[in-house]
Amino acid sequence: MDNAISIEAMSERLANGKILAGLDLGEKTIGLAVSDRALSFSHARPVIARKKFSQDAEALLAALASDPLAGFVIGLPNNLDGSAGPRVQATRAFVRNMTRFTELPFVFWDERLSTVAVERTMIEADVSRAKRAAKIDSAAAAFILQGALDRIALLRQS
């Protein structure tokens, strides 16, 4: 069983005061961001160092335990041509495996070039290479989540 839903379905499920979490799965870390309660802005949170899947899932849910979470938006790392490679399969497997730990839904969000865009912004802001490395995954998660929040805002206008 899979707990993935569309952005449209997520928009319909969002109750007042609930927030969304954004995730960017890296090989060594999980970037994490959360929305505000108005679902207008995303805010980066500290990254989660990856270990084994069960430890990653528990650390992720513990990091969000005090938040009124409605669901997750997770970056789907499609290839530039839109095809799915091994990282897409790993991301889909992560979401499938999360059903053992949470019933909260996940939305897959195309993250092509999100890390590149975030890194360029950080370079333009003169952030050092060491600081970029420590924050890039959470900044990418915030970028991914912001795209989804913007889409939800458009859905709610129509």
Image (tube, grey):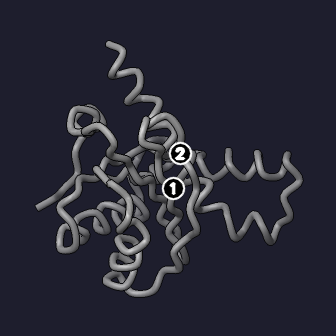
Looking at the image, do the residues carrying marks 2 and 1 touch, with CB atoms under 8 Å apart? yes
In percent of the image, x 37 and y 47: which residue is there?
A: 19
Instruction: Evaluate whether residue 105 shows in this view.
Output: yes
Instruction: Evaluate whether residue 112 shows in this view.
Output: no
Residue assigned mark 2: 42
Q: Which mark is residue 33?
A: 1
Quadrant position of residue 110: top left
Would you place residue 90 above or below residue 144 in this image? Answer: below
Q: With 73 as the anchor, is 81 left or right in this view?
A: right
- Which circle's residue, 2 or 1, is located before the other in the chain? 1
Q: With 116 as the anchor, is 36 left or right in this view?
A: left
Q: Residues within 10 Å of mark 1 (few under 14, many from 20)?
A: many
Would you place residue 129 above or below residue 48 in this image? Answer: above
Q: Secondary structure at mark 1?
A: strand
Q: With 158 as the anchor, is 22 left or right in this view?
A: right
Task: Return the residue found at the far left.
Answer: 1
Q: Secondary structure at mark 2?
A: strand
Circle 1: residue type: Ala
In percent of the image, x 37 and y 85: which residue is there?
A: 55
In percent of the image, x 29 and y 37: which residue is there?
A: 16
Q: What is the quadrant of the C terminus in the image?
A: top left
Quadrant position of residue 90: bottom left
Q: Which mark is residue 98?
A: none
Label 2 to label 1: alpha-carbon separation: 6 Å
The percent position of residue 14, horizontal first and vertical second, equals: 26, 39
Would you place residue 52 above or below residue 20 in this image? Answer: below
The percent position of residue 103, horizontal first and vertical second, equals: 17, 61
The percent position of residue 105, horizontal first and vertical second, equals: 23, 53
